[in-house]
Amino acid sequence: MQALNQLFTEKYRPKNLDHLILPDRVMAKFKDGIQQNMLFAGSPGTGKTSTAKAIVNQFELPYLYINASTDTSVDVIRTRITDFCSTMSILDDRNKFKVVILDEVDGVSDQFFKALRATMEQFASNSRFIATCNYINKLPDPILSRFEVINFDFDKAEEAELTKKYIRRIHEVTKAEEMAIEKDALVEFVRRNFPDLRTTLNKLQGYKAQGTTTIGLDDVKRFNSVYKDVFELIFNETDPVANYKLLVSEYANRVDDVLQSLGQDLIEYIKQEKPQAARFVPQIIITVAEHQAQRVHVIDPVVTMLSCVYKIQTIVRQ
């Protein structure tokens, strides 16, 4: 398998509003800029983070990005966010809001929310906040009341049009990567992963990493993941040092994606390539869920990833 360089999800992240694939009702909310605090809620991979970054790029707004799934301490509010909102450089445009992007706020503590609410009120005159979450039910009402909530999940009427746009986007990416994909394979590939464009791009990169230059329908139906080497390590590699070297060197900056793949792609990998391990699937799912929950509270997220992989290794080798 070829080594991973830049992830397709970052390489092909939309740079401005014109590159986004979203329903018209969502695009209408910020076509003229950002005037109020916004909360983007919806399933993983539907473009919430990309949209937030596209907005600040489109309107050339000064911004601070905080990954709230890792930077969960109240000190983040008291130092980084407060310093950003309160300082003014000679290059700042006084007619433009500063923007704080808070990614994945559905895993932060009550103390974080309390400090955030106070900070939003303190800097309401010059700053706006864009937050993203997958599970809106985890957010307290006092926080929700300070945002306009925008739903990124698509209804059936929107799905047909957006699927066509997804197909065009994936076709463009394959051409840019000097790959080819047969028409029926392209349609099936998008259908299987819709609406998660992030997973679609990760799987496309998986084909390239495996040396597949032309993707047919049989390839789409066969298991594929950019993290397949992690799954093979779980079942085949017994040297803990080798495990550590691979995971840290290749995936230290992709912990969230690895954990997500362990809860989704690994199950499909087992079904197709390791059916004898199917009896372990419930234990694996519980283990991944526990580690995803711990992820919010662990200072070094790589430790969470390593622990999860080692635990799953122990399970499948019972």
Image: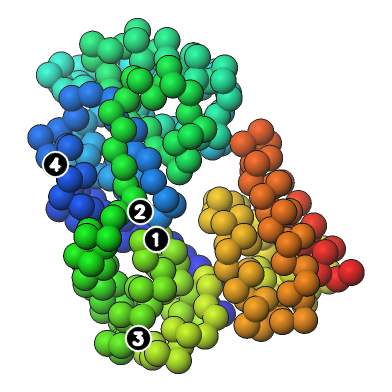
User: Residue beneath label 4, please?
Assistant: 28
Mark 4 and mark 1 lie on one chain; the one further toward the N terminus is 4
Q: How crowded is mark 3: few (under 14 residues within 10 Å), some or many (20 or more)?
A: some
Q: Residue at x 28, y 12 (%)?
A: 124
At mark 1, the secondary structure is loop
Q: Which numbered disc flags the more N-terminal residue, 3 or 2?
A: 2
Circle 2: is it few (<14), some (14-19), or many (20+) Cα within 10 Å?
Answer: many
Discs 2, 1 touching: Cβ within 8 Å: yes
Count of numbered tags: 4
Q: Element type at marker 3?
A: helix
Q: Which amino acid does label 1 sit on?
A: Asp
Residue 37 image offset from top left, x and y in percent: 28, 25
Pick the front one: 206 or 185: 185
Residue at image mark 1: 196
- List the residue tagged with mark 3: 185
Alpha-carbon span between mark 2 and mark 1: 6 Å
Residue position marked by numbered label 2 in the rendering: 46
| N-terminal label among 2 and 1 | 2
Residue 167 in percent (x, y) is at: 26, 73
Q: What element carries label 2?
A: loop
- Under mark 2, the amino acid is Thr
Inter-mark Cα distance, 3 to 2? 22 Å
Q: Disc 4 on helix, strand or loop? A: loop
N-term-proximal mark, 1 vs 3 = 3
Q: In this view, does 245 lie to the left or right of 179?
A: right
